[in-house]
Image (spheres, helix red, strand yellow):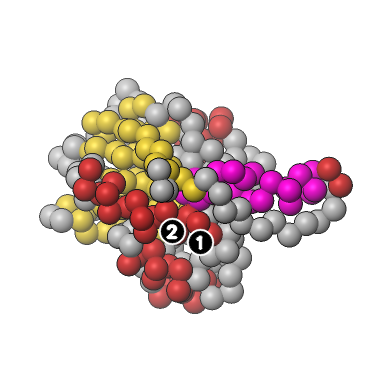
């Protein structure tokens, strides 16, 4: 089973990259299932119905998210209606939507868990306990389980990778928008990377126009951050998983340029 996981899709440039590059990537890597973090897919923040439908039409199967999931109002209804959109599992009971779910893929099943970190982020419930209890539930149905750890701190992500080694098939980081070069299969068979990266404009500060972000840093005054436009790239990871054991065989980083 080959799973392609696309890092945070940022705005229209990110969606254009998915549209243009995903078909080729699917063919080249014989991809069975595509997961993408889409918390920034609509105008750089949040997800709308139109944008989710657009991404599904390009070949994405499931959308995960993170701290920006609630930025567009329509998500509050949408996330209860469309099972293909997940929010972090460690919101307290009562939050709309689901943070974990099992999806049918060919003759197998893939469980997906989306969890937020809480170091240098809003304090949700414990990501370790939440991810473990989600794992215990989903593992009743399948051995193939992918975790999107949406977090700021490298240490928190690395620790979760070790915590779930031998349980999850993959623990993949998102949120920083910068791909890390530490992809590996941990000793007990869990594929790991601290951050998959971003799908969006790279002549930017994590997807936003450089001047806007610099003004904010230099003046400390609130500034509207526009989505940048130049040097669009798709960053992702391909994970090859043994269907019987759920263990990862390999993880490969992907960086592709639009119009290269
Ligand atoms: Fe993001
Ligand atoms: Fe985020």
The residue at the point 36 percent across, 46 percent down is 5
**Residue 257: horizontal and vertical position, in percent?**
42, 43
Visible residue check, residue 27: yes
Using the numbered discs, state the Cα–Cα distance from disc 2 to disc 1 in whole angstroms.
Answer: 6 Å
**Residue 74: horizontal and vertical position, in percent?**
54, 75
The residue at the point 46 percent across, 68 percent down is 51
Visible residue check, residue 66: no
The residue at the point 63 percent across, 40 percent down is 119
- In this picture, residue 221 sits left or right of residue 143: right
Neighbour tally class for label 1: few under 14, some 14-19, many 20 plus, Cα within 10 Å: many
Neighbour tally class for label 2: few under 14, some 14-19, many 20 plus, Cα within 10 Å: many
Query: In terms of depth relative to the viewer, which is nearer, 235 or 137?
Result: 235
Q: For the residues labelled 2 and 1, say whether their Cβ atoms are less than 8 Å apart.
A: yes
Query: In terms of depth relative to the viewer, which is nearer, 205 or 102?
Result: 205
Say whether residue 127 is magenta.
no
**Residue 88: horizontal and vertical position, in percent?**
50, 55
Report the disc number at residue 16. 2
């Amino acid at each position: 089973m080959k799973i392609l996981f696309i890092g945070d899709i940022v705005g229209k440039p990110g969606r254009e990259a998915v549209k243009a590059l995903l078909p080729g990537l699917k063919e080249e890597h014989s991809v069975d299932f595509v997961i993408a973090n889409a918390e920034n897919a609509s105008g750089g923040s949040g997800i709308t119905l139109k944008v989710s439908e657009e991404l599904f039409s390009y070949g994405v199967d499931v959308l995960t998210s993170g701290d920006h999931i609630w930025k567009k109002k329509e998500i509050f209804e949408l996330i209860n209606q469309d099972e293909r959109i997940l929010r972090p599992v460690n919101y307290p009971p009562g939050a709309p939507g689901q943070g974990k779910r099992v999806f049918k893929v060919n003759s197998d099943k893939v469980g997906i868990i989306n969890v937020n970190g809480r170091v240098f982020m809003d304090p949700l419930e414990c990501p370790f306990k939440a991810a473990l209890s989600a794992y215990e539930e989903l593992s009743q149905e399948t051995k193939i389980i992918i975790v999107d750890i949406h977090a700021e701190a490298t240490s928190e992500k690395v620790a979760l990778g070790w915590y779930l080694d031998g349980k999850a098939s993959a623990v993949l980081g998102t949120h920083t928008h910068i791909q890390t070069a530490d992809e590996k299969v941990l000793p007990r068979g869990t594929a790991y990377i601290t951050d998959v990266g971003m799908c969006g404009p790279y002549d930017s500060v994590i997807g936003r126009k450089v001047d806007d972000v610099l003004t904010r840093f230099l003046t400390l005054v609130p500034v509207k951050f526009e989505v940048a436009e130049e040097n669009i790239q798709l960053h992702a990871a391909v994970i090859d998983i043994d269907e019987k054991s759920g263990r990862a065989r390999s993880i490969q980083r992907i960086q592709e340029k639009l119009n290269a």
